[in-house]
Amino acid sequence: LATGKYIAFVDSDDSLTPNTLSEAMRAIEGAEVVEFPVVQGYLSKHAQRWEPTKQTISFEEWMRRNGFTHCYACNKVFARSLWQDIEFPAGRIFEDIRTIPRVLQKAKGIRGSRDGAYLYCDRENSISKTLSLDKLQQYVEALLELMSLPEAAGNTALYLQALNGQISYHRMGGKGRLVPPSKVPWAYVFKQGLTAKQRIKALWFKLTYR
């Protein structure tokens, strides 16, 4: 039903800091998407702020920088034309993972802004807080859809995220393999910036998941 040139999403229990959208509109010139900071759990003492790069990047670079770890509809302003022929899947959860990358694929540029913020409220009864076997399976399937995109080829971080989801699925009693086996390169195991836990887990997957 939207008729404007641009579109943004805000959930009913979340908020935006003042001027977030006006700053995003200033930044969007020359790009078709602006991504701005997110404060997760802003009503809790464990609130965390994430900020995007200030550069204008392609979708391929967005994937390479693991933008999928913040694959939200709500911290972006989009040119509405990008949504032509794209809809959120009916009856599916983790719909942002299934939809936003397809929109970003069409953008001529994704620009980051450090101004303002989306204030995301963590609720105890939210989907991420009340995971079930079906929800975990849908989560892993959404990541597998993302992995099928050409720009995701060879993205080890995304692959490991899917495997982590599969571990949670098995802990809930799920059976069978959801994620096909693939090689974790040694270069990733020794990649700078990984925590000790991430490095150990990457090594474990490399040696055991075949």
Image (cartoon, helix red, strand yellow):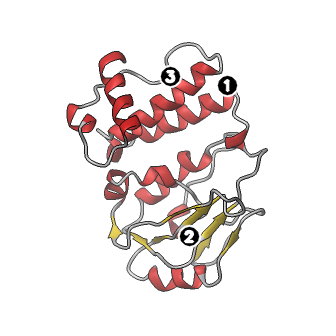
Label 1 belongs to which residue? 133
Amino acid type for the residue under numbered disc 2 = Arg
Q: Residue 171 at what x, y percent from top left? A: 60, 20
Q: Label 3's element?
A: loop
Amino acid type for the residue under numbered disc 3 = Leu
Q: Residue 157 at what x, y percent from top left? A: 37, 40
- Cα gap from disc 3 to disc 2, whole angstroms: 34 Å
- Cα gap from disc 1 to disc 2, whole angstroms: 35 Å
Label 3 belongs to which residue? 178
**Image mark count:** 3
Apparent side of residue 42 relative to residue 78 in the rendered image (left or right): right
- Say which of marks 1 and 2 sits in front: 1
For the point 79% across and 44% down, the residue is 125
Apparent side of residue 151 relative to residue 127 in the rendered image (left or right): left
Q: Can you see residue 26?
A: yes
Mark 3 or mark 2: whose residue is earlier in sequence: 2
Q: Is residue 156 above or below residue 23?
A: above
Query: Mark 2: few, some, or many residues within 10 Å (few <14, many ≥20)?
Result: some
Q: Which mark is residue 80?
A: 2
For the point 61% across and 17% down, the residue is 174
- 46 or 138: which is nearer to us? 46
